[in-house]
Amino acid sequence: MTSTEHHYETTESSVAYTGRIIAVRRDLVRMPDGDVSQRDVIVHPGAVGVVALDEDQRVVLVHQYRHPVGGPLWELPAGILDVAGEPASVAAARELAEETGLWADRYDLLVDAWSSPGMTDEAYRVFLARGLHEIPVEQRHVPEHEEVDMGVARIDLDEAVRRVLHGEITNGMAVIGLLAADRCRSAGFTGLRPLDAPWPARPAHSG
């Protein structure tokens, strides 16, 4: 079933709240029936994540406290796009280095996703990193805030997928990234997009 596409005109827009990372924008939008309805949008700079896979087919995961859910989650190394103009792949390499003390010889673009399009413009891009090696201790990033007690583990990719399907890994980016990596591995890692592939979903305010 198809319908005539409606132009959802924003008749009024204002910023209701501005925080350290996010803002809340209040839009009035004209609906197909002619009514104007309010939509509150969490404005987010966007994010990147990394599925770092070693030569033994183990994926590097971090165990990080997340205040909104009141506890730690198993996640991919990841971070927000908070450096204006920085390519997403560069941001991903930086986050991998800072959170795990690892560099990778090769990066490929794995998958793009909206985090929760009913409430936020946050989009994220996940990369596949291979050819991992340790950064010398004296050159590593000094952690702060939640990263101070962040755990880092290498888990067999098959086991990580099992944990996803058993509800033990529930972070959205991790779920998507791990399942995508498993699918790509089964296809011999062919058909992956270039690092600089167009990303129209990247929030404009992320630089």
Image: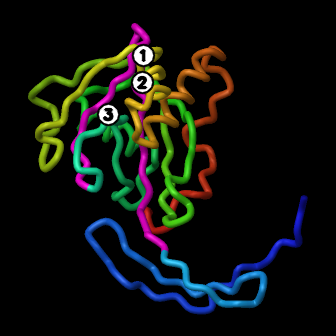
Crowding at label 3, few (<14), some or many (≥20) Cα neighbours within 10 Å?
many
Q: Nearer the viewer, residue 51 or 130?
A: 51
Work out how far the residue at label 2 is from the one at label 1, CA to CA, in angstroms: 6 Å
Residue that mark 1 sits on: 159
State the image coordinates of residue 104 (x, y, percent, origin top left). 37, 25
Residue that mark 3 sits on: 74
Tell me, yes or no, whether the highlighted magenta stretch contains residue 66: yes
- Quarter of the figure with the N terminus: bottom right
The residue type indicated by label 3 comes to Trp
The residue type indicated by label 2 comes to Arg
Residues under numbered marks 3 and 2 in contact, where contact means CB atoms less than 8 Å apart: yes
Work out how far the residue at label 3 is from the one at label 2, CA to CA, in angstroms: 10 Å
* Marks 1 and 3, the one that precedes in the sequence: 3
Tell me, yes or no, whether the highlighted magenta stretch contains residue 206: no
Residues under numbered marks 2 and 1 in contact, where contact means CB atoms less than 8 Å apart: yes
Residue that mark 2 sits on: 163
Relative height, residue 128 to residue 186 (above, below): below
Left or right: where 174 falls relative to 10: left
Q: Quadrant of residue 141?
A: top left
Q: Magenta stretch?
A: 41-67
Identify the element where label 2 is drawn: helix
State the image coordinates of residue 51 (x, y, percent, origin top left). 43, 29
Relative height, residue 155 to residue 112 (above, below): above
Q: Nearer the viewer, residue 68 or 42?
A: 68
Work out how far the residue at label 1 is from the one at label 3, CA to CA, in angstroms: 13 Å
Q: On residue 187, which mark appears?
A: none
